[in-house]
Amino acid sequence: MILDNRYNYTAKALLSVSMLTVSRSLCQKNLQQSTTSHFVICSVRNRHRTWTYKRFLIQDKFDCRKPRYLKLQKCDFRTTQNLHVPPLIALLLRPVLRIGSLLMGRGMKRWWLRKSDTEKEEYKRWFGERSNIFLGCFGLYGLILALYYLTHLETDPLTKRSRFIMFNREQEKKLGKMVLEAHLEVHKADLVPHSHPAYKRLIRVIEKIFTANKDLKLMRDTQWTLTVVNTPLTNSYILPGGNIFISLDILKIIENDDQLGIVLAHEMAHSLLLHNLEILSGQLMWDFLIAVPILLIWALFPDMAAALIHMIGERIVTVMYNLPFSRGLENEADEVGLKLAAKACIDIREAVVFWATMRTLTEMHTLPTELPGWISTHPAHGDREKHLNATMTKALELRHDSGCAVLPAADPRDKFYKRSAKEQETYFKQRGII
């Protein structure tokens, strides 16, 4: 995502998933009817309360051995002995755990206050005699969570990083279909017609990245879809299962197809790295971990004090863990996306120019002002610009090793940085950005 938080979008859209069971079955049937298609252009039409997809399939012009591909794709799916949680249950568990812990703690406190001094002394004595049992229960609870966490750690094939994910690939596909349907309903008034020229351009770049990276199993297994929306946000993001959403406004800022390839490769990297599933898994595990502390806070402190401690604790966890983790995933997607683009023979130097453009437009107040880095879900534009510049040498070597043509001698980064502030403003006006 460029400027907004895809995870908040996903959570909000899922609130309407239960209303879309009919469209889900229709979408699943349609997707199964064309297993050789890699890209789907999505649009919706409301007729008798039933949502359907108009699907325009892009034929695979590059893979001449489709039967073999289909056989490999079928054999790639395998069962696992791990206990995977259905995503919909996980989403329902999150508010249940938090609200349930709060209400239970508050109920225990009120129950205690109704007791007489004599009864309180009796309960204290009773608890003291069985304190080891209660401590053992808390220890067992923590041990179960630790074992579940350790048994669901896996190594990412692209980054070799260990990560915790409690969902399997089949569950990701089901979650992706549900979230896609919900997003299409949310954006039903903003969907751009499939005949729009942007679709042809976007599909061409996506197909280029896909073809160059078909050696990756996850790239082949993903059913990529594309939806273009006409919203005021300069934004792009990806939903679970390879469902790419992009706004028309961001195409005004993107200068050429190389920069477009950088943006799309970044979003595709998020999907290949299963970042949506990793975040949802981590959030649910955190909810299980803090359920007992929330219960104790609301049981031991007055309501006002408990609410204050609860709020401060949530903010500390967000600032100290959730936000840095989110920024780390963005940097990871930048690095992997740069490699995907390099293998597709894209001029990856344009990645630096794109983020330098975003930084400059923010400084000119053309784009919304960025939040301070420590309270943002995404790294600052300038930080991403520097980070990609630092990793450019290895990425250019990968591009060369992929058999790509030699890049033009004129470096687009030099061209951008040589412009003065006034020249930048004039240039952006000429392009219609300002």
Image (cartoon, grey):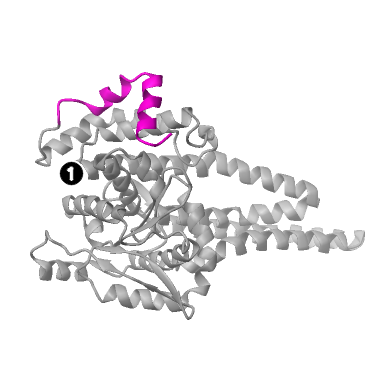
Residue underneath mark 1: 343
Q: Quadrant of residue 313?
A: top right
Judged left or right of residue 390, residue 188 is right
Residue drawn 73% across the image and 59% down it: 105
Residue 266 in the image: x percent, y percent?
32, 45
Comparing 412 with 97, the one in front is 412
Q: Of helix, strand and loop, which one carries label 1?
A: helix
Q: Quadrant of residue 191?
A: bottom left
Residue 217 in the image: x percent, y percent?
22, 58
Comparing 101 with 118, the one in front is 101
Residue drawn 74% across the image and 60% down it: 129
Judged left or right of residue 345, residue 304 is right
Category of crowding for the residue at label 1, using alpha-carbon neighbours closer than 10 angstroms: few (below 14), some (14–19), many (at least 20): many
Count of marks, rendered view: 1
Residue drawn 65% across the image and 52% down it: 293
Comparing 325 with 372, the one in front is 372
For the residue marked with disc 1, what is the amino acid?
A: Lys
Q: Quadrant of residue 316?
A: top right
Q: Which region is colored magenta?
A: 408-434
The answer to whether residue 130 of the structure is visible from this angle is no
Comparing 163 with 337, the one in front is 337
- State the quadrant of the C terminus: top left
The answer to whether residue 401 of the structure is visible from this angle is yes
Residue drawn 51% across the image and 39% down it: 376
Query: Residue 16 colored magenta?
Result: no
